[in-house]
Amino acid sequence: MTDPDEAPLCLPPRPLRNATGLRLPIGTCDTHFHVFAADAPLASPRSYTPRMEEIDGWLALSESFGIATGVLVQPSVYGLDNSVLLDALARHGERLRGIVVISPQTSDAKLRQMDELGVRGIRINLRNRSGVGFDALANLAPRIRALGWHVQFQVGPEAIDQVAELTERHDIAGVIDHLAFMPLDPPGPVLDALDRALDTGRVYTKISAPYRLRDSQTYDGYRQAVAALSAHHPERLLWASDWPHTELFGAVPEEDDLVALSISAVPERDQSAIFAGNAQALYFAH
């Protein structure tokens, strides 16, 4: 068993509130959220211990704010066991897609089964224990490319250039989580590196989880970064809720504050693409 001191228990998401009736743009896709189940064994070692937030919680979130579709991402605490995610896809496949964590030994038959359920990519995670690293791509990239899948990267700023190089080497699309966890107080050279990665036409980034990025209390750096990336590459940005906000141990943001921040940060001319259209093409085209 993992020592609880090494895998602290996350705070739960805040109870939903939406007093002003905020609604996201029509067709919004939440491209990054997680679900958990009490009967699924947790990996050891792991970076955190999640609350058992199930799909019903996300469905309530989507109802409150007008989220049309979603992308379930395999959390590191389940390692290579994607059963919780795949079960959710089997039950809600009409509106969900998935990103899994798999080993190079995964059979082609298993990949096809996952594809039929709605899986559209694999996750490389260098930031959490029990994640899969870059070395898995040599085997997996050509096989998932044949299915039309992409690679999702949970990496820090130091790996942005390597992600761009890997997507070119393997001729595959890549998605960088959470603006590569860049510092935003203010955005600096890392923002330029991310912009260059988007220049390749192979890389996307999620403008999600601003609370994970070092910034001012009013998120001025986040607004600046989103505006700058939107000005150059609105077709390469994706929105996500990051629900239920794992790895938060001191405070959890309010959902309506996060939604309001996202809407205000994305220029109105680009909202249809960033909240809906880009995700539709990447996750729901087949």
Image (cartoon, rainbow, N blue to C red):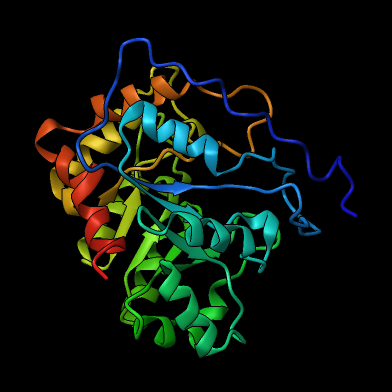
Q: Which of 110 and 155 is in front in this view?
A: 110
Instruction: Provide residue 37's location: percent of width, then percent of height.
Output: 68, 49
For the view shown, which residue lies furthest in the front direction? 91
Q: Is residue 98 left or right of residue 264?
A: right
Residue furthest to the left: 269
Q: Residue at x 69, y 40 (%)?
A: 52
Residue 9 visible in the snapshot:
yes
Report if residue 154 is visible in the image: no
Lateral position of residue 208 relative to residue 270, left or right: right
Q: Which of 157 and 275 is in front in this view?
A: 275
Query: In what quadrant of the picture does the C terminus appear?
Result: bottom left
Residue drawn at the location 33% of the way across and 38% of the way down: 67
Q: Quadrant of residue 256?
A: top left
**Residue 98 vertical position relative to residue 113 in the rendered view, above or below:** above
Image quarter (top left, top right, bottom left or bottom right) of the N terminus: bottom right
* x then y, percent, for residue 75: 60, 54
Left or right placement of residue 3 versus residue 285 in this view:
right
| Residue at image point 44% right, 31% down | 61
Q: Judge whether 182 appears above or below 61 on screen.
A: below
Q: In this view, does 139 lie above or below 204?
A: below
**73 lies left or right of 225:** right
Residue 160: name its quadrant.
bottom left
Report the residue at 45% width, 16% height from top. Answer: 17
